[in-house]
């Protein structure tokens, strides 16, 4: 393999100086709270109210819920197709997961068709 030219070395050093710390900061900012959450969280259930159905490549057979409206957490994905079609406004869904001071994360859901 031929030695790197001066221009290539400068680009490589700039990459190391700029992108590696930036990627490290993002991974710590996302990963550290998740690790803390999963170590201290306790089992919990959370009821959410149906707003509308949605389906995409990322979230197949999902529903948008009224309790969450942020970009990254407004959908509950992976519902059964038959149950997904039966949801109406006001129906509830029970999310089963873990709760801590940092938030709630669900690992499964149980549908409650027909309201509260």
Image: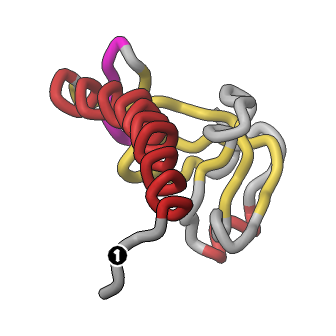
57, 62: nearer the viewer:
57
Give, as a single range, the part of the protein colored magenta.
Answer: 96-101
Q: Residue at x 62, y 38 (%)?
A: 73
Q: Overall secondary structure of the magenta stretch?
A: strand
Q: Where does the N terminus fall, quadrant-wise?
A: bottom left
83, 13: nearer the viewer:
13
18, 67: nearer the viewer:
18
Side of 73 where 107 appears, left or right? left
Q: Secondary structure at mark 1?
A: loop
In the picture as drawn, the residue positioned furthest to the left comes out as 39
Q: Is residue 86 magenta?
A: no
Q: Is residue 68 above or below residue 77?
A: above
Q: Is residue 15 above or below residue 21?
A: below
Side of 37 where 113 appears, left or right? right
User: Based on the displayed image, in which of its 4 quarters is residue 98 positioned?
Assistant: top left
Colour pattern? secondary structure
User: How far across and how far down the image is residue 104, in percent?
Assistant: 42, 28
Q: Residue at x 35, y 84 (%)?
A: 2
User: How far across and how far down the image is residue 89, in percent?
Assistant: 83, 43
10 Å crowding of disc 1: few (<14), some (14-19), many (20+): few
Q: Is residue 105 at least partly visible in the picture?
A: no
Q: Is residue 64 at least partly visible in the picture?
A: yes
Q: Where does the C terminus fall, quadrant-wise?
A: top right
User: How far across and how far down the image is residue 108, in percent?
Assistant: 39, 52
Q: Is residue 48 above or below residue 9?
A: above
User: How far across and how far down the image is residue 49, in percent?
Assistant: 68, 35
Q: Residue at x 64, y 51 (%)?
A: 113
Q: Is residue 100 magenta?
A: yes
Number of numbered labels in the structure image: 1
User: Based on the displayed image, in which of its 4 quarters is residue 42 positioned?
Assistant: top left
Q: Which residue was labeled with disc 1? A: 3
């Amino acid at each position: 393999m031929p030695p790197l030219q001066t221009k290539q070395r400068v680009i490589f050093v700039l990459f190391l100086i700029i992108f590696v710390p930036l990627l490290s900061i993002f991974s710590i900012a996302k990963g550290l709270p998740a690790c803390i959450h999963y170590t201290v969280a306790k089992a919990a259930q959370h009821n959410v109210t149906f707003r509308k159905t949605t389906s995409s490549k990322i979230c197949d057979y999902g529903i948008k819920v009224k309790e969450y409206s942020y970009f990254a957490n407004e959908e509950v994905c992976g519902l059964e197709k038959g149950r997904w079609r039966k949801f109406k406004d006001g129906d509830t869904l029970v999310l089963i997961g873990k709760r801590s001071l940092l938030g709630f994360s669900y690992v499964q859901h149980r549908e409650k068709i027909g309201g509260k």
